[in-house]
Amino acid sequence: MDDDPSPAPGPSAEGTNVEGESPQIEPTVETEEATITDDAELERTLGLSGGLAIGIGTMIGAGIFVFPGLAAGNAGPAASVSFAIGAVVALLVALPASELATAMPKSGGGYYFISRGLGTLAGTVVGLSLWFGLVFATAFYLVGFGYYAVDTLAELGIAVGAELVIPIALLFGAGFTVLNVTGTENAAKLQNGVVALLLSILIVFLGYGGLDAAGLLGEPTAPERFAPAGIFPVFTTAALVFTSYLGFAQVATVAGEMRDPGRNLPLAMVGSVLIVGVLYVVTIFVATSAFGSEQLEQFGETAMVEVGRHYLGPIGAFAIVFGGLLATMSSANASVLSTSRAIYAVSRDALLPRRASRINLRYGTPHVALGLAGGPILVLTATGRVQLLAEVASFLHLIMYGLICVALIALRRDEPEWYDPDFRVPGYPVVPALGALCSVALIGFMQRESLYVGVGIMLLTVGWYLYYARDVELKGAL
């Protein structure tokens, strides 16, 4: 070990023990595979298009291709309102998160903001909860990917059983992890290409389906009662589908790798929510116009395939099944990237053992953090519990979103010298206050099982803080 174990100063803002020692600090190691240095930084290779691709690509998969059948079964055509509620809550958080991100453009996103605004305990709980929340979300996306992979094969005339859904999901989950090890730029290129192709498919399909549903093409359909089960299911469905809006926060987790973050971060976060929110509402309108809510629920996770078949025949079915494959692939790939960056940021602050922030010399990526992301993701993917995975991910993210808004208020109140954001939230303090309240309110509409799992994870993070991280003192953001 080095004689001086204290971390080097600089923008990485590592945590230190109050007695002056940094827990689990490793010596600098340089090999062909990895290095641990206190001043190592990830390269800034992502632009606005890369940020939008991460945000849109993560959100668009679940919202459009996995949730319509489940959401319509719960709330009927009013599920469109559920998605709109989710978009409003996401925007109320995206604006404060944008301000914080331009003041602290570091990998780790919400964890970094909260730890610097609210202290070590809140940072530890949120940092580890973000890790688990992204793991649950990624597993959810991978299970959806498995369903669409099986349906794609079926549309091509290759009959395979539903028992292959999970093995396919596991195989590709491991593949995405390896891809992200080989470089952020490689993962971003895949993301950009997938999102561009996916948006092209959706614009054509939703344009035709929207005209047909409005009676301008084809035969008009008899309208279904808008909210057949009443108002309450609209809010419970909003809590379920909020997983669809996790992508904008994942942009913040790669803030340390974005060029011109003062401009690109706010545009990527707010822009991705607006674009995807509109697509969600139109999708539910088109889907519930094609079939009744009960029939959509029976179709399950791949209901949109039958909607495509209804409007455009076999070509429409194949376009949607291929689009669903692309969308869930893009969501899973972006989430693996973001999960590893959350682990990397917490480890850099010494709230986890510092070996988790090793950076691969060849590819410039945090390969240990990617391993810590990929392993749990594969374990949860094997459960195949779509709704539980989605709601637990939403629970943990909503806790973080509420605290992001609180952290902004705390930092605006204290105005430390280093706090100099390039973007400031309009309507302060109303917007962050509403963002915090709405985030917590949505949690109240979740299923008990999801709440129990989410609360259990948070208690584990508090236990880790008491055992390992309570003596860590975080330095300022700059």
Image (cartoon, helix red, strand yellow):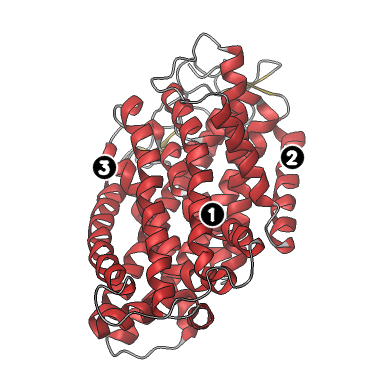
| Sequence-first tag of 2 and 3 | 3
Q: Which residue type does callout 3 highlight? A: Ser
Which residue in the protein does label 1 denote? Answer: 242
Residue lying at 52% horizontally and 62% vertically, measured from the top left: 139
Q: Residues within 10 Å of mark 3 (few under 14, many from 20)?
A: some
| Figure check: 15 above or below 271 | above
Q: Are marks 2 and 3 in contact (CB under 8 Å)?
A: no
Which residue in the protein does label 2 denote? Answer: 462
Q: For the residue labelled by badge 2, is the local secondary structure a helix, a strand or a loop?
A: helix
Q: Position of residue 319 (x, y in %)?
A: 26, 74
Which residue in the protein does label 3 denote? Answer: 49
Query: How far separated are the C-alphas under marks 1 and 2?
Result: 25 Å
| Closer to the eye: label 2 or 3 | 3
Q: Which residue type does callout 2 highlight? A: Val
Q: Position of residue 399 (x, y in %)?
A: 64, 43
* Location of residue 171 (image quadrant): bottom left
Q: Residues within 10 Å of mark 2 (few under 14, many from 20)?
A: many
Residue lying at 48% horizontally and 49% vertically, measured from the top left: 87
Residue lying at 61% horizontally and 13% vertically, measured from the top left: 414
Front one among 74 and 147: 74
Q: Residues within 10 Å of mark 1 (few under 14, many from 20)?
A: many
